[in-house]
Amino acid sequence: MHLVFIVLVGFAALMWSPLATSSNERKTIDGFPCAMVATFSSDPSDMTREQLFYAAHAYDSGDCGAEDDARAFPFYKESAERGDGFAMIRVGYFYLNGTGVERNAEKAKYWFRSYALAHPDENVSEWTGMVDTFFYGEPLPDLFLEVMKQATQDYNSEADVLLRNYHDLSSGNGVKADPSRARTWLLQAVELNDPRSHFEYAELQRDRGNLSGYVVHIRIAAEFNSSKAQAEIGKLYLTGNGVMHWPYKALVWFLCAKAGGQDVDALIAKAEAQLDALNIKLAQEEATKFIEKNTH
């Protein structure tokens, strides 16, 4: 089940809870005391995720009193900064319409795209029946739908596009950074057997301490003619780190890496120092065949 669906269902439970019509009897939002909203810290950064959720809704909907968009906005904004998907959409909506904050279309697009890149396979058509509830009778903004459509197209595009969005979401370039969800884009590129993607995924595995995963994807990237991966797999064979110590295979990959522009002369010399003349010649021949096969 998609994350947004879970979040929206949570909001549905909140909004459909019975509320008394008398202001004296209006005490809870789904069992949460409305009176407590007024006791929360005035600084959203000091509030828990649950407190932000209830405070934003209380002021946005008016369920606990008068509707106050300007007071709702900072709670949504802090929630969005912490990665809450619904809050990202709501903050974008506020910026787009100048609701509770000065209108800013660029910031609106920033938050809409932050959500879209984190959920590129989300089918917003599945939200039918919920939209009126969560946007108080207003449809999803056209800008949000356009950004979601673009993210979906990108997600089914070529490796260059997938890697660009992976880097943007990983680093926070033009969107709210979300490295864990960025992996979705990288894995999609890996499925295309793009050598750069295998190399980057290998580095991700290494950084997480997964040596076997690193070796697998470095080898695949090398086979798909990534010269950087060829240099790396050569080092592994030369040292026996995670693979068999195999100077012959190390030399083959170093020679391929050199043909691809990598500075590996010193490593070639180290590999050759562990081989006799015959094996050096055979390694050179194997590398030449690989290079010819992958340059035509």
Image (tube, rainbow, N blue to C red):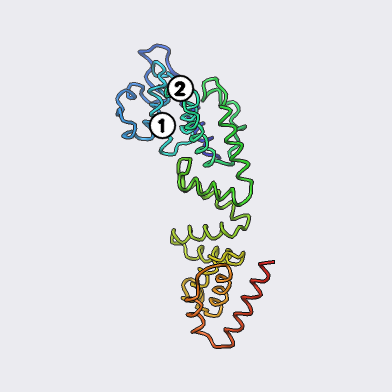
Q: Position of residue 1 (x, y in %)?
A: 56, 40
Q: Is residue 170 above or below residue 262?
A: above
Q: Position of residue 144 (x, y in %)?
A: 56, 31
Residue pushed farthest top? Answer: 22
Identify the residue at image location x=54%, y=46%.
Answer: 165
| Left or right of 40 on screen, residue 127 | right
Secondary structure found at label 1: helix
| Left or right of 146 on screen, residue 210 | left
Residue at mark 2: 99
Q: Closest to the observer: 85 or 101?
A: 101
| Residue type pointed to by label 1 | Lys
Residue at mark 1: 77
Give the class, few, some or many, for how many residues have Cα within 10 Å of label 2's Cα (few <14, many ≥20). Answer: some
Q: Closest to the observer: 273 or 242?
A: 273
| Residue type pointed to by label 2 | Thr
| Left or right of 60 on screen, residue 4 | right
Count of numbered tags: 2
Secondary structure found at label 2: loop
Identify the residue at image location x=57%, y=74%.
Answer: 255
Q: Position of residue 142 (x, y in %)?
A: 58, 28
CA gap, disc 1 and disc 2: 13 Å
Q: Is residue 87 above or below residue 186?
A: above
Q: Earlier in the sequence, mark 1 or mark 2?
A: 1
Residue pushed farthest bottom? Answer: 277
Q: Is residue 238 above or below residue 210?
A: below
